[in-house]
Structures are given as structure tokens and as C-alpha cells.
Image (cartoon, coloured by chain):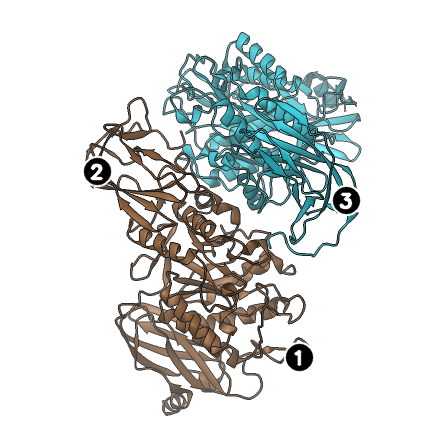
Chain colours: A cyan, B brown
Amino acid sequence: MATLFLIVLVGKIIAQDKIEKWDVFELTLKGPATGNPFMGTELLARFTNGDKVYEQEGYYDGNGIYKIRFMPDKEGTWSYVTTSNKKELNNSKGNFECTPAATNNHGPVRVKATYHFQYEDGTPYWPFGTTIYEWPFQDSATKKQTIETMAASAFNKARFLAVPPYKDRYITGPLTITTFPFEGTNRDNWDFSRFNPAYFKNLDSCVAELRRIGVEADMILFRPYDKGKWGFDMMGQEVNKRFTRYMVARYAAYRNIWWSMCNENSFIRNMTDEDWDELFKLVQEKDPYHHLRSIHNADRIYDYAKPWVTHVSLQYYNVVKAPWGTPLLRDLYKKPIVNDEINYEGDIESRWGQLSGEEMTYRFWNAYIGGGYATHGETYKSSPWISYGGKLIGTSPARIAFLRKIVESGPKGGLEPIDQYWETNMAGKAGEYYLVYFGKDKPAKWDFVLPKRDLTNGAKFKVDIIDTWNMTITPVDKEFEIIPMPDNRYKFIEKNKASIKLPAKQYLALRIYKTADGTKVANDGRHELE
Amino acid sequence: MATLFLIVLVGKIIAQDKIEKWDVFELTLKGPATGNPFMGTELLARFTNGDKVYEQEGYYDGNGIYKIRFMPDKEGTWSYVTTSNKKELNNSKGNFECTPAATNNHGPVRVKATYHFQYEDGTPYWPFGTTIYEWPFQDSATKKQTIETMAASAFNKARFLAVPPYKDRYITGPLTITTFPFEGTNRDNWDFSRFNPAYFKNLDSCVAELRRIGVEADMILFRPYDKGKWGFDMMGQEVNKRFTRYMVARYAAYRNIWWSMCNENSFIRNMTDEDWDELFKLVQEKDPYHHLRSIHNADRIYDYAKPWVTHVSLQYYNVVKAPWGTPLLRDLYKKPIVNDEINYEGDIESRWGQLSGEEMTYRFWNAYIGGGYATHGETYKSSPWISYGGKLIGTSPARIAFLRKIVESGPKGGLEPIDQYWETNMAGKAGEYYLVYFGKDKPAKWDFVLPKRDLTNGAKFKVDIIDTWNMTITPVDKEFEIIPMPDNRYKFIEKNKASIKLPAKQYLALRIYKTADGTKVANDGRHELE
């Protein structure tokens, strides 16, 4: 017993007494620095609070320091004990208090109701993502600016690379990397058995900064884009697995982490879908908190139906060229659809970076009206946001913020297609709330007709006319009472066949919401496909 | 030996001496009629011709008659020997001559180059399907009329039910069924252990008639639509399997058979996807010739990626509302996409049967421009083609025939998307042949610009202007010479920036074909997704 006690004192250096729910409890242990501590050290801690038990792996952080990061998800006293094949790290014990989450801390994001998301505390989360692939590898001023820009924007998810491309893949410009994930200075002398803690300490602070401002860190573990220069896309599966395990040990305790296994994975031509399966399963096994997991496809589309994929992180631009693309994918995958690459607003020579703000906004609306989500990015020559972060200069972010406000003021359960095989430009909550999006049409009027699902005879509605580009919401000064449409088994119509006058321009929408219930009408029991 | 010889003489009643390649060789055996010959009789024959060996199951056809139908796929002498657990049927031997196929006989249809089809003799097969769900159960005159109509049309695939709905599922009208697949007269007295040979003899002749006129029989084994009346949609999986096995034994030797496991399968609420997997695997195991296999979905979409599914037989109307829907499904499934239900041309009250001829034609063009296929149907109150067959009165069949001629005169490999993430309304063969479809747009001109893939500097092209609705093809009296487009890494342009004047109306297309090669231009090696 005396010996054991001594080991505990030696092993543990620092640990918090108290930590907010879903924050990072960090246990720091002193251990051997000799040999190669990265290799062959098994270290984990078992954390217990009543019936809650988690096992969290630790990692080596250099200079004889080992860390175990843990995300408590229950208030009260947690106790822990370490297990290691190294004597100094084994059987370190302790406990800490988990206090209530602060008001801006809602826990990790989970899948909700098949197609949507919510925070663990039940708060709805509607992703409005953006793309800042190489932001962690910029100078401090740029990183600070990126965080300030993000905090002032509507974006609440950031896609970025955990390892930068050899040279800027996206927009030509200076990118000087001097710190690498492995020991060494170039591909002739990497030591893939030794991680470089300094590199990851920077990433730590990036993930933590995003968490501080309430942004989900959709962190991409692997990427192509080495063009044979660094070789981080051809390390072999053993090193891929070691890297994945290290990343999970290091970042799983950040509540805002989402695991994106790879960007444009099929462009890493030497890796098969079976390799990705293996890495997915490793993350699934090692992450005690089961953060969201996906992968971002290129030409060969990974099968997002596989059980370890929590949501679809798609690159397929055409899907958002009409609002019915996303519902099709919902039906095929039965998972949330995040259109994570729909081209970028910008003016570069590559055609994937030439969207107008109008087109980006249009694609966003199509994604959300389709019951899914989308991710923004900017590729202006003068401000390469998708590469470096910095500042946003495009015209779509304000409109995306406008859309977010509309979505947030809509149904708690998110926007759902209402009659998706027939009324492709309508989403909301049947019987209660409808968003009708006219896209590039220029309607001069809209006849008040709704699909019958969950409608009641005599129900009343109010309508707002939304100009999605000019960001105006104009209430229509009238209440609309509906009746079943004569000679039509699918529709309800305003009792006096009312129409709504519209300004005959592009990018209009209607918001229609119930103000009074009517009387239920017998359903003829037919399937929607009929 | 003497005993054996005797059995052979007793067992075999009739068999052809000579049969055309891919026709049905039918071996008729006399066996026991006592007990229940449908149950517990194992009978198969092994057919051998050099290194070709097939095992084909037989079936009981009533009155002590057992049959084995075989489709030889190699010319020359085939020998066979039967195996059975019934002495009278066991060890029947013989041989026959397989002669060359007649000119209108190209063998069964196979998948070709991932997304397309061809006959086994290498002749391309582009499906232009139609739908005649209940045609086998009509009177002789109507069946004859259906065959005459089909033979005079462009349709070369027919979707129909092997078991009719209890009452007309599609269009109200008289349907009197007195012969059923099982012994009995109604659901109170079905004997699911005994098939009714008379019922299947009618189906035999229907499949054979379609084969005679060169139409693929896309025969649907199961269907919902019983509404509790006959109970053929709730026979239980043991009977489902017996029925499937009987159908395969009976129809696999017809070269024009395609197996469609079910229509709108998820509407049979008591059957799971695992049940369908099992039936698929049974067909796969029992059909020696591996005819095409699919299933036609309703609201829950069966996973067409499963290995026993040869092609996608989809019901998802929205997919053909733009030409990019089908390429998306090609990318997801890596199989031929047959949009087998895209609503029907007609005037019934159900909205799935209200397409105009223009809209049906438009959806067809979208499917083929997307590198896939589509299936027609007509639902006019005055002529319920999709139910009974009979005659076609719609306006789309002539336009579909026109499209078929265009497709058949195009690239042998079928229409392929050329730059699918960007030029969504173009298909053909890169560098050689382009169909550009303008759908509902009303272009007054088209600038001669093509995506660079496989183009050469100085190549020359001719152009036809196609009016897909009025079925006219108007050659443009000019040859177009192309150069790489200045300041654009993706395009070639006519050297003098030529445009083509168009009549500013809907449903136009261009056919652009190479008349002279140019000089290869260095490719910058970028991925198409870029």
C-alpha cells in the first residue's frame, strides 16, 4: 500500500479539482522519457460517476509528460484510476467535481430524429458551416482574426485540416510550415514513430478557440494534396492507425469535435474503402463520447450508409441545384445530409471557386428546404478564406445569417419536406409551418394552396413574403382560411381562392404559419407515393 | 444397365432434338401424380456441352407431368441427365443439338460497362420500357392487341405482374380473375402447397409472346395491392420462397426474363429487407443463366448496392426532373439506373397518372441524358394501358420512339455524362459525340463551347438541331472547328466564337458529332471535381 501511494504521488502532476460539465478534465502524469515513449505505451484511465463509466486513452506529450483528457457528461463527483503497462503511469487515482454547464455550453452535437442534430442538452443545433482548411497553420494574428470573424458570423461549424497540404491546395499564396506532426523536417527524415507535441499544442488551442466561440470543429484527419512532397498521404496503414489513435486520445474530450476521416478521400489513390472502414472503426472504438463521424468524398463516393458513419458529409455540387436533391439522399441514407462542399463564392480561375453570392445563397436555400444542411466557403483572390481564414468579404455570409435566423425561428424539429415527391420547393412542419422557396423563378403571385397532410378544415394562416437576397420579411396583411380543395384529393385551398401578390423577381420565399386550428378531415388513407 | 434404360424410356415423354441457341429446350417427364407432387419432389437436370455445365431445376406441371426447361447458350451437342428423389424422374438421359441463333435472337440481356446493357451476343440493348401490369390476365383479344401494340411501338421492355392485384390497383375497371396461382378459389381455401399449372401456362405464353416480338419481360414476382382480400402479399416467407423457386424453375429458360422481386416492395408491410435479401439470393442461386435481378421500391428504398441486385429499378419521380439526378444515382450505386416509374401520361384523378406527353417525354430525355434509362406508362381513363395493355393513345410514345432512334444512332457504348458535375445537360462520348438537351429552357442561340475532355485542337464538328417534341432533325449548314478557349482551363470554343441560332422554344436538343480530328493538347492533369 505504501508503494502504491508513492507511485500515485509521482505519477500525477496536475489535475483540476473542479470542471464544468462537457469541459476537458486533464490529468497530467510524469513518466518515462527514455526510449520512444510514443511507442508501446499503453495508458488509459477509467472514470466513474455512479453508473457512468468511461475509459479514456492517454497520450504522450513530450518531455516525460503523459496526459489523459476526459469530458465528463454528468454533474457530481467523478473518480478515476489509470491503467498502464508503465509502472509510473499505472494506478494513478483521484477524483474531481463536475459542475453544471455554463449557459453557452450545450455539450457535444448528436444526431436527432434521423435527419437533424441537437446538442446533448437538448438544444437544437442546425449546422451552418464554413470552410477554413488551413487556418490552424497561419500566424497568430491571422488566427485571431479568423476567430473574430467566425464569432461575428452566423457560422457554427468549421471544416479544417488537421494536417496542412504540402503547398496551398486551394489558393496560391504563402504558406510556411515549420512545425510538422511528426519529428523531422522533410520527407527524407520523418520519424513516423514519434509525434511532435508542439504541432498538436497549436491544434489544441485552435479547437479550444472554436469551442470558446461556440463553433463545432469539423476536423479532417487525412487529406490528399501532398503531390509526393511530404508523404503524409502515403504513410501506410500502420502509421495511419497510430495517427488516428493519437488524434482521438488527444481531441475526443473537446465537446465540439466532429471527426472527418478525410477530405476528398478517394484522391488518396493508395487507400481503399476497407482502409477507411478500419480507421472509422478505430475512432468508433476509441472515442468514449461517440462524437459525430463522417468522411468527405471525391470521385469515388464512400458508402455513407455504413453503420459507423453518423451523417453524410457530401461533395456533390449538383445535389443543391434543386431542393429535391437533398431529400433523395435522406431517403437513400436515412441520416442527416450535410452538403459540405457546394463550390465556393469567389473569383479564382478554378471553376469550383467562382460562385456568385446569389448562387451560393440559392444553393444554401435548396439544401435547407430539402431538409438538410450546407457549408459555405470563400475563394476570393484578395481574401482566401477557405485556405487561411482571416476575413470574409463575400456577399453570401449575410444572407446565410438571414437564413439561419429563419431556420432558428421555425419548427424546433427542423425543416422537413412536407410532400416531397410532388411539392419539391416546400419544407417545414405539416399543418403548422411552411417555407416555400421559389429559387430562380420570378413569381408574380402565389395561389394559396397547400398539400393536405395534417391540415384541418377552417384552419387559419398568416404569411410573410421573404426576399432571401435583400433580406426583407414583409407580412401579408390578411389571414387565410383553408378548406379541402374541391375535386382534388391532395390539396387544401384558401376558401375564397385567394392569391398572394409577389414582386416577380428571383430568390423569393414565403413563410406560412398557422394562427388558428380547424376541424380534422377524414384521410383517405392513401400513400404519399400515389 | 437394362433397368436404367427402362427408366429412361418411361421417364421421358417429349424433348426436342434440336433447339436454337437461347431458346427453351423443354424436357417432359412422366412421374407420380399421387400425393402432393408439388411438395418434396427434387428434380434437376445437368446439361453439358464441352466445358459448359448447367444445373436446371424442374417443376411439376400437373397430371403427372414434370418439366425441365433449359436455355442452351452454346451451339453443338448438349447432353443431359436428370437427378431426382423420385425414381421415375431420376437418371433420365438424352441429348440435343443447339443450332445458331436466328437473326432476331440475341440472347439474354446483360449489364455492360457498369451503367449500360447489352445482349449476350454483344448487340447493344438500350431499355425503352413500358408498363402493362395486368396484361397477362386479360381476355385473348386484349392480349393479342397488347402484343400488336408493343410490336409496333419502340418499347422493348415490359413491366408486368406475375400475380394480379385483388382488384385493379391502377385504374378502375373490370378485371375478372378466375384462375389463380394456387389451387383454390378464394382466400378461405387456398392450398399454398399446390400451384395451379393452368395459371402458369397462361403466363408462359405471355412471356413467350413478348420474346417473339423482341421485348424483355420484366416480370414482377410479388406485389402489395391485396388489401386483405386474396392474401397473396401475406403468404409467409416459406410460401414466398416456394413460389419464387417455382417461378425460377419455370421461367429462367426464357431468354427475355428479368426478375423483378416485387413492385413497391415496402408497401408489403410485413416483409423486411432481410426477407427480400433471402428471396434475391434464392433467385441468384437457382437461376443458372443469371438473368437480371432488381426490385421496385416504394417509400423505403431497398439498398440497390447489394451484390445480388444487377441494376436499379427505381421509383423516384424527382430524379428525372433534371438530367443530373440519374448521374448521381450512377455514382452512388455503380450500376445501370432504370427509372422504372416516373409517373404516367394520362388524365386520371390520381396525381401519379396526370403527366402530359410533353412532361413524360421531358423526363425520358432527362433520364437518357443522365446516362440512364426510363420506363413509360399510360393512364388515360379511356385506355388504361398500364393496367390492361390494349392500345396506346398518348402523345409520348412517338417521341420516345424518336429518342430511341437517336440513342441507337449514337455511340455504341451508350450515352455517358461528359462533364457531369458542371455540364449537367450534356451526354454522349467525349471528343466524338454530344447530345445537349435544353429541356424547358427556350434558347435563341447556343455558343459553340464544349468541355475539353478528349477534345483536340482543330477538330471539326457538325451539328443537328433536334426538336424533341416535333421530332425534327435539322442539320446546321456549317462545320465547326475548335480551339482551346482562351483564359479558360475547362473548355474548347469554336475558333471564330460561332453561335448556333435556335428557335427559342422548349424541348430542343443539339447533336454534335466530330467530322475531323485535331491535334492533341496537353492535359493539365487536374481532376474533374476541381
Amino acid identity at mark 2: Lys
Percent position of residue B2, x then y: 36, 92
Q: Which residue is mark 1?
A: B189
Amino acid identity at mark 3: Gly
Q: Which residue is mark 2?
A: B478
Percent position of residue B424, x then y: 41, 38
Residue at 35% x, 40% y: name it.
Answer: B503
- The C terminus of chain A is located in which quarter? bottom right
Q: Residues within 10 Å of mark 1 (few under 14, many from 20)?
A: few
Q: Mark 1 or mark 2, which has the lower sequence index?
A: 1
Q: Nearer the viewer, residue B354 or B205?
A: B354
- The N terminus of chain A is located in which quarter? top right
Viewer-nearest of discs 1 and 2? 2
Residue A45 seen in the current view: no
Q: Which residue is mark 3?
A: A458
Q: What is the C-alpha distance between the residues marked 3 and 1?
A: 49 Å
Percent position of residue B34, x then y: 55, 88
Amino acid identity at mark 1: Asn
Residue A42 seen in the current view: yes
Q: Nearer the viewer, residue A130 or B429?
A: B429
